[in-house]
Image (cartoon, rainbow, N blue to C red):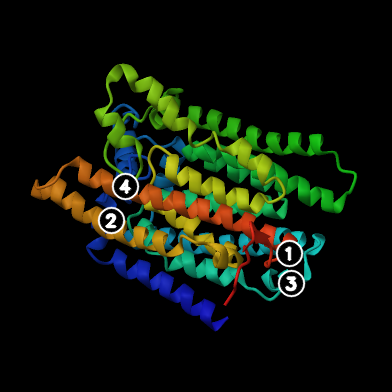
Amino acid sequence: MARIGWIFVAGFLARFCLFLTNFHKIFQKRVEISTPLNSWLRVQEGLFLKGKQISPYAGDTYHETPFTLVLAECLGGLPEMGVILVFILSDILTAIILALAVEEARSFYLMRSQKESKYVAEAKQLEIKDDENYGQYVIMSYLLNPFCVMNCVGQTTTVFGNLTSAVAIYSMLKGFRWTCGLSLALAAYQSLYPVSMIFPAVICIYDKEKQKQNDKCWIFSVAKTVLAFLVPLVGFFFISRNISNDWDFLDRTYGFILNVRDLKPNIGLFWYFFTEMFEHFHLLFICTFQINAFIYVIPLTIRFFDEPSLLIYTFHVLLAIFKSYPSIGDVGFYLALLPMWKHLFPFMQQKFLVGCFFIATAVLAPIQWYLWIYSGSANANFYFGVTIAFGTAQIFLLTDVLLSFLKREYYLKHGMSKEIDGKPAGLHLR
């Protein structure tokens, strides 16, 4: 407990001290941190326009939902230090909820499958121990993660999006249908892409109900979960219509996300391609790029139907890679969940490579940006090369986790001394 306390103190002080320095203003303008969809400066501009009786969607600055304006109005009555504390405490609360969610996933799914499955005797050393505390590693990974720290100090609305997503994950793993539906609807309402999380939500809630009632009909369970998601989502749309007095916000938010109208550089893959794209190919490639965020959902759900905790992690990684305006806040969120797969680390083969990629791209991104924008001694290809490497590292990490999961399941069922083509295929753990 003392160690956890020091982690909270360190996470709080790291954020608070950086807020008091010039890094606060620098991070607010960094393209890796702040995007057209999460910039607090743009939110303040939208709030200013609304105060002047001008629609915040009239220009090309504000592209977030009307709810964000309401939040900004509420925070506008606080002193600057109060707003800073709201951002920091939201980040700390996110870490706590994620830790609780990971502990629930470990105790219900990982330990349950371990107890219900029949594994060979020699694979006992691969089983997860009951006294493993994954939660403290998650808290450490979130509060001390440089990506999460910079995301918070940069005052992006991703801080609140991460909090909403954490509540949705915890609720679905606990089987709280209406809390899950409400929080997931709010997350999808804010950034559209989390709509794919309805698949693991349906599975998790049904599993919880099946545990309590063995004869539970899955059709009714799925229908109620989908309704618990859709009803609040539709309600949010109508409330937003009343706030903004028209339906223009739909095109200015979701239309903006899907059509990628702002090609300002970020850590994603969209901006460079559509800067170079011929206009008559625009629609084709928009559809091709956007479908990547959703096309893997159904096949992965079918393959890992019994492991919704793995689906939750996988979908968050895919969204961070393939969404149109990603930021390091999205990456830091799923990296904080990585300790949930601590038992897979001995099977992962790309840890060193992925770690080097993450460090190298984190260092090179601001350097290449400076050379391109300020020095004039580089061009867009240099910066895009860094974003390509960063995206590749994320894909390597995800595939490594998935393959390690399958490899561990194989060893648990067939043993570690099996031979393939006369050669040993076992794993030697240190």
Amino acid type, callout 1: Met
Residue type (three-letter) at the residue carrying disc 4: Thr
Identify the residue at image location x=40%, y=21%. Answer: 284
- Quadrant containing the N terminus is bottom right
> Disc 1 or disc 3, which is closer to the eye?
3
User: In the shown orientation, is residue 9 left or right of residue 105?
Assistant: left
Precedes in sequence: disc 4 or disc 3: 3
The amino acid type found where label 2 is placed reads: Phe
Q: CA distance from mark 4 to mark 1?
A: 38 Å
Q: Mark 4 or mark 2, which is nearer the start of the sequence?
A: 2
Along the polypeptide, which appears first: circle 1 or circle 2?
2
Q: In the figure, is residue 286 to the left or right of 109? A: left
- Tag 2–tag 3 contact (CB < 8 Å): no
Q: Position of residue 127 (x, y in %)?
A: 70, 69
Q: CA distance from mark 2 to mark 4?
A: 18 Å
State the CA–CA distance, disc 1 to disc 3.
18 Å
Q: Residue 150 sits in which quadrant?
A: bottom left
Tell me which corner region of the image, top left, top right, bottom left or bottom right, holds residue 287. Answer: top left
SS class of the residue under badge 1?
helix
Pointer 2: what residue?
Answer: 27
Q: Which residue is mark 1?
A: 111
Can you say whether 319 is above or below 309 in the image? Answer: above
Residue wearing tag 3: 122
